[in-house]
Amino acid sequence: MKAISRRSFLKRSTLLGAGALVLPRFSIAQAGASASSKVNVALVGSGGIASVAIKGILGQNLVAICDVDEANLTVYADQNPQIATAAKFRDFRVMLDKMGGEIDAVAVSTPDHTHFAATMDAMQRGKHVFTQKPLTHNIWQARTLRKAREKYKVITNMGNQGHTFDGIRQMKEWIEADVLGTVREVDSWFPGPKWGTPVWRKPESYPPAPMPIPEGLDWPLWLGPVADPGYNSVYQPKAWRAFPQFGTGMLGDWFCHICDGPVWTLGLYDPTVIEAEKIDGPNPGMCPDGSIIRWDFSARGEMPPCALRWYDGGNQPPMPENWTWGALPKNGSFFRGSKNTVFLDERSNHPRLINKEEMKAFKEAGLPPEKYPRLPQSGSDSGPVAEWIRAIKGDGPEPGANFDYAARLTEVACLGALAQFYGGRIEWDSEAMRVTNRPELNVHIKEPMPKGWEYGEDLWKA
């Protein structure tokens, strides 16, 4: 696809679902700087998935790096030469205390259980924040970040590449043009977890036996607000996602990509019931080998009730009768409409009718007109980090996966993870933010915040 120039992008851009382009609140342009000014960025977490942020801020000023593991501080030095000269820290709180006046924006790329603390600390200091998916580790944290976005009025975005792609916008246009008819079911799937890989590892016994803490790792800081189970290499550096105290399982890994399309285009935000229809190989203290999870959503405006199902670990949805594109893709979503069923891929991109000949005829007849603005699709201007940087500079609209939307998407993922980790049926009162049929699960809706890790309580005071 031909890359969109910045000039063309700005001419075409509007806020998604809104009117004309507006300058994002508290962009550096509003402070008197021009769009050509460089943004001073700090990293919280500099290994693993931090490569997304490190590549995305090329051309800006990388002024500080924070990581609890010394091995990560320079791991991507070949990708960004500024890593060599940036100030180095272990504790993001110390970094923000000492260098807050030199930092405009913070990119958070830590395990799920410390996303919230690092993100809140930066926001309450007036820093723009980019945080990896899933946005938070629990539902209270997600709702608190929505409140924080409104209070602190900084530019926010979550690391959800697909939300910057053309395909998710095209899918919303097709739904609003009634191409699918009534959609009452969506099936989404992914083959993992892939046990035995660096990211998905099972211990020989549970709980894992304590091991010596590696040199250069500040284990208490890595734990943050979580009680110490004893260091074991299955937790850190890469396989923490499978354990509920640190991660959010397969749903935390892929829901925000694959189900971004269903959630955003159909407005699937506040389920009433979440149920584990199938759990394969339940693993004590870990996510299962596979599952089928269902969310039930009530009617939304003119849209009828809808069920969203997630399949993983080798579980797959029923193949539509008139699918003619060959073997079932390894991952993606089927939107099952009364008129047409549409497939959307793993990044909520490339929608297509499930019958190849019907898709060809559909294109020849003319696709629904573009209604939602397209973003750059290739080069250094593409992706969620570049989208965030443009908004900070006042050179583009507020990011599509800003924390108002990203928090709602993450909340649905967290509810699914609750069913995946603990099984059974969950009846959810969204307004009260509580599980009504299994009150013992409510401890996971808002997890304890020990001394030194208390954030966000003030945002809930009248």
Image (tube, rainbow, N blue to C red):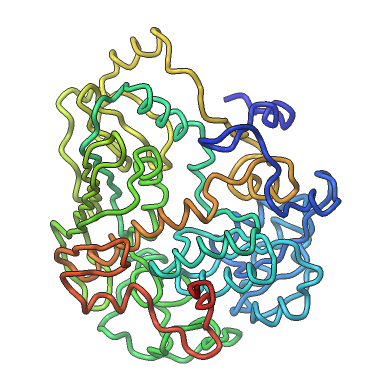
Residue 22: percent from left, percent from top: 68, 39
83 shown above or below 262: below
In the rendered structure, the answer to whether residue 346 lies left or right of residue 385 reads left
Residue ID at (62%, 70%): 44
Q: Image quarter for residue 101?
A: bottom right
Nearer to the camera, 425 or 317: 425
Numbered-mark total:
0
- Seen from the viewer's position, the closer of residues 374 and 176 is 176
Q: Is residue 381 above or below residue 199?
A: above
Residue at point 40%, 30% (across, down): 171
Find the residue positioned furthest to the top: 365
Compared across the picture, whether 459 is left or right of 362 comes to: right
- Asked whether, in this view, residue 136 is left or right of residue 307, the answer is right
Residue depicted at x 74% and y 28%: 7
Q: Is residue 212 above or below residue 53?
A: below
Query: Residue 172 location, x and y as percent?
Result: 41, 31
Viewport quadrant of the N terminus: top right
> Residue 321's spot in the image, x, y percent?
14, 26
Look at 30% across and 39% down and name the residue there: 333
